[in-house]
Image (spheres, rainbow, N blue to C red):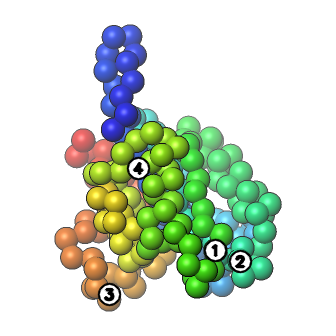
Amino acid sequence: MRTLRLCGELIFMKLIILDRDGVINQDSDDFIKSVDEFIPLPGSLEAIARLNQAGYRVAVATNQSGIARGYYGISTLNAMHDKLRRLLAVHGGSIEMIAFCPHAPDDGCDCRKPKPGMYRDIARRMEIPLENTIVIGDSLRDLEAARAVAAKPVLVRTGKGQKTLDKGVGVDDTPVYDDLLAAVNALVEEN
């Protein structure tokens, strides 16, 4: 955990990593291919703002194989993320870093979850260790990538979360919440 000294007081900078589709915004088996299709889930923007207010630095790690599949390009992805940042600003929230994997599932990259490459990149760039960092996702791949770097996975039921939970594989003792806002409320109240 990175520390900062402000007016003589030592402040701990906490990091939380969020998945995007199904956690922050609506998910689709047909991919989110345009800015218009990027629709925040109820309460997700407020949840991110609450994390910021509680002293968390927020990062996003998202698989975006729609790029490799030719469904949309980097400029469209950037426009979606610009929309997210604008909507968050209205709620007083921000995301410090968005890492994405543009590769197809069979490309053999190190960044596509369940591999932990994006998480390691976030930790390196933000200069915060991943051990015990909270990672909130809606799929088994999110949980597996978190465990690979000694982070603490959290599952939400939105997106693919309920299907993941119903399968029961790899969920074990992972905390489960209805959505991002419920997870954040529990986290902030606990700390």
Residue toward you, 90 or 52: 52
Comes first in the chain, label 2 or label 1: 2
Q: Secondary structure at mark 2?
A: loop
Category of crowding for the residue at label 2, using alpha-carbon neighbours closer than 10 angstroms: few (below 14), some (14–19), many (at least 20):
some
Q: Quadrant of the N terminus?
A: top left
Report the residue marked by disc 4. Answer: 16
Which mark is nearer the camera, 1 or 4?
A: 1
Residue 58 relative to residue 184: left or right: right
Q: Measure the C-alpha gap from mark 3 to mark 4.
A: 25 Å
Report the residue marked by disc 2. Answer: 68
Q: Residue 115: x and y, percent?
A: 45, 70
Comes first in the chain, label 4 or label 2: 4
Q: Measure the C-alpha gap from mark 1 to mark 4.
A: 24 Å
Residue 78 relative to residue 16: left or right: right
Residue 39 relative to residue 36: left or right: left
Report the residue marked by disc 1. Answer: 103
The amino acid type found where label 3 is placed reads Asp
Label 3 close to label 1 by CB (< 8 Å): no
